[in-house]
Amino acid sequence: MTKRSTSYLLVLAALLLPAAPPASAAAQPAEPRVLVLGFDGVDAELTEQWMAEGHLPNLARLREQGSYAPLRSTVPSQTPVSWSTFSTGLHPGRHAIFDFLKRDLETYRPSFAAFDETTVPFLAGKWNPALFAAVGLLLGVVLGFLAAWLLRMQGRSRRAVAAVAGLVAALGLGWVARELVPTSRPLAINRQQGDTFWEVLGEAGKRVRVMRMPVTFPPEPYPHGELLAGLGTPDLSFRIGKPFYFTSELFFQPKGHGDFSIETVELVDNKGVIPTEIQGPPNKLFPERSAYVKIPMQLAVAEDRSRLEIEVSGARLSLAPGEWSDWVRFTFPFNSLVKIQGIGRFRLLGLDPEVRLYLSPIQFDPERLPPILSLTTPRSFADDLTSRFGLFKTIGWMIDTWSMTDGTIDEEVFFEDVAATVAKDEEMLVGLLADDEWDVYFHYFEFTDRVQHVMWRHTDPLHPLYTEEGHARWGDSIRKSYEQMDRIVGHVMETMPPETFLMVVSDHGFASWRRVMNYNTWLAREGYLVLKGESPERANLEDLFDQGEFFVNVDWSRTRAYAMGLGNIYVNLAGRESQGIVQPGAEYEALTAEIRQKLEAFQDPENGEHPVAHVWTRDEAYGVYDPNLIPDLFPSNNEGYRVGWQDTLGIVAKEIVETNRDIWSGDHCSLHPPLVDGVLFANRPLDLDPQPYMGDVMPTLLALYGVAEPVRLDGRSLLP
């Protein structure tokens, strides 16, 4: 029914029906709209300090209007873990997202905890050539008979034409299937368990819009809703985010240790026309033909070195040093039939004396998605967003921190990326907020987290990379990111529909990362992890994707415990791990108690501090869990310490405790959760005693609408 016909019916009803009773007698209170703004990594202590100093006036006003409290995070206090609890109302043992990484019980190999990647047949799989040939035969025979009939051919001649046409079509389509059609395709499976608040409210008839919630890829349909997937959505290379650095600098070495997926490309010259290429997605459709799909790119340096001309994938652009390109569309052909489309942006870092060119992670083009992949639900929502707001970042980890960490871009370029990312997401928030098509709306911003990760060294005088010069230039950058959050909140408070219930939430706080705690090295020194030879010097995230080797030279026949992920310890348990030696029961209990006691007592040899604040058993942390999935012990660090990158990937470092000299200088992932509380604001009074928990938001939303909990939730309603 159109809006116009609806209005005619309303007029007719007004003329024919008796007047309604006064509103006070007949009308029921309208259900409120709910708007939740999620800001990743906003720390309670910093927020309170800057509110007191007058830097966050809108958040202070929100506190005065309604409520504020530090928000208790999960164990551990990690982004995918905490937001999954927010989404489901379940603790991590029940929703099964407990870390960024999990281990394979058979191979001990790490993989991403939130998602599994598998392959499924494409069409008929290995029988595609036979299927296509059969279809070709049938189609060819029909067309052959039709052609013969049109040519007035009779009897044997007509049958001969049909047979030849069928044979040709069968051979042709069989060749197409064999050469151009894949037999299998990759499939991502989200391992988060439990019903989300948008699914439950959608089933109850509420219109729920969710923008960039972590751990929502691939997006699952739900009634009356629209969702854009967030953290976990890969780039075109199926990485968290793989940026590129093209340089003519000879023997370029990154500032970092190569822990992240930076694609560094050495150019053959620094002048004239320079041929190069872009390495695109791994060739998962035709792996026997090539490891990656690559496309050529040509660079041309102007004689006066004032501009760089770029030709790639049919696009031609010209950049001066310091300029960003608009979105560039890239086409990566697996073959002449199968192609994949992506988007990315260049930034010319410099031309004199060497060419230095940055390319953002190439991500899926929201207007030209492969038919087997969706970034939104419904699928058409991606088209709606693009038609309204233009091209936008589709990758889950939107702001590039990896290049900053490896030193291929500096702070200025990093903050240009931050500004562009936030501007586009704020534009989408403002536009979607003005719609009259939602009852509950959640919008997530990541920039507060990403800024703190790489800029903390400029604010902490005790950090090894702190300098007076850096502090003078960038020492207020974290506070400015909080002020940007405050400005967004203030604009929303002024423009959201009247009577909207507003909440502002963060998943965890932040702290300085000055010292590195290597649990595998500690386990090896204490005799719990036994090596047959030297451990490899380093691994990186690329090894996760390229089937690299992990736990090389570990003697599993004598190893009783090992560490993996951001601070998790596993017992090499008989009957669970493929080469387990520790017996369940008394031996297991004695071992975990011993490791726990020793870790909490361990002192940093350099300063006498305790790197480990507390060690939870999984029973203490969760109570209910999958015993084959969840780690046996959760060590948590004191302020200033975090588990090392190499330890995360199963490498035994040279020292138990090391100095952190990485640009990635602030963190929260393995810290003791009470040290890194998030925040909760609301524009109405809430019951905040005892301290609210990340899992309290879902039951609060359900209670607000009178919707029953789908199962017993681990949080509580905060409604007074």
Image (cartoon, rainbow, N blue to C red):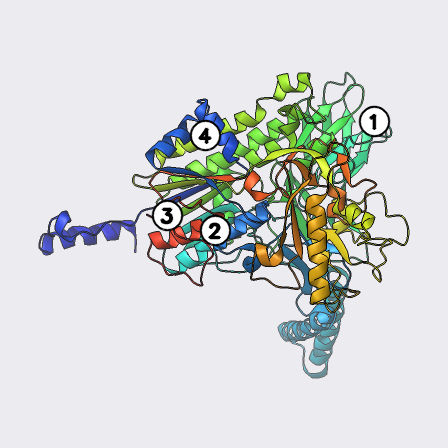
Q: Which numbered disc flags the more N-terminal residue, 2 or 1?
A: 1
Residues under labels 4 and 1: Cα distance?
42 Å
- What x and y, as percent, mark residue 250? 86, 28
Q: Which amino acid does label 4 sit on?
A: Asp
Q: Residues within 10 Å of mark 3 (few under 14, many from 20)?
A: some
> Which tag, 3 or 4, sits closer to the chain's start?
3
CA distance separating discs 2 and 4: 24 Å
Give the CA separation, mark 3 to mark 2. 27 Å
Residue 262, located in which quarter of the rendered image? top right
The residue mark sitting in front, 4 or 1, is 4
The residue lying toward the viewer, choosing from 119 and 447, is 447
Q: Is residue 644 left or right of residue 443?
A: right
User: Regarding mark 1 in the picture, which secondary structure is present there?
Assistant: loop
Q: In x, y percent, where is residue 203?
A: 40, 61
Residue 522: percent from left, percent from top: 78, 46
Q: Residue 449 location, x and y as percent? A: 58, 36
Describe the element under mark 3 as helix, strand or loop: loop
> Please, what is the three-letter code of the amino acid marked with disc 3?
Glu
In the picture, the disc for residue 249 is: 1
> Helix, strand, or loop for circle 4?
helix
Vertical relation: 661 (above or below) 194: above
Mark 4 near mark 1, Cβ–Cβ under 8 Å?
A: no
158 shown above or below 711: below
- The Cα–Cα distance between marks 2 and 1, rounded to whole angstroms, is 50 Å
Label 3 or label 1, whichever comes before in sequence order: 1
Residue 167 lies in quadrant: bottom right
The residue that mark 2 highlights is 695
Q: Which label's residue is closer to the chain start, 3 or 2?
A: 3
Residue highlighted by disc 4: 486
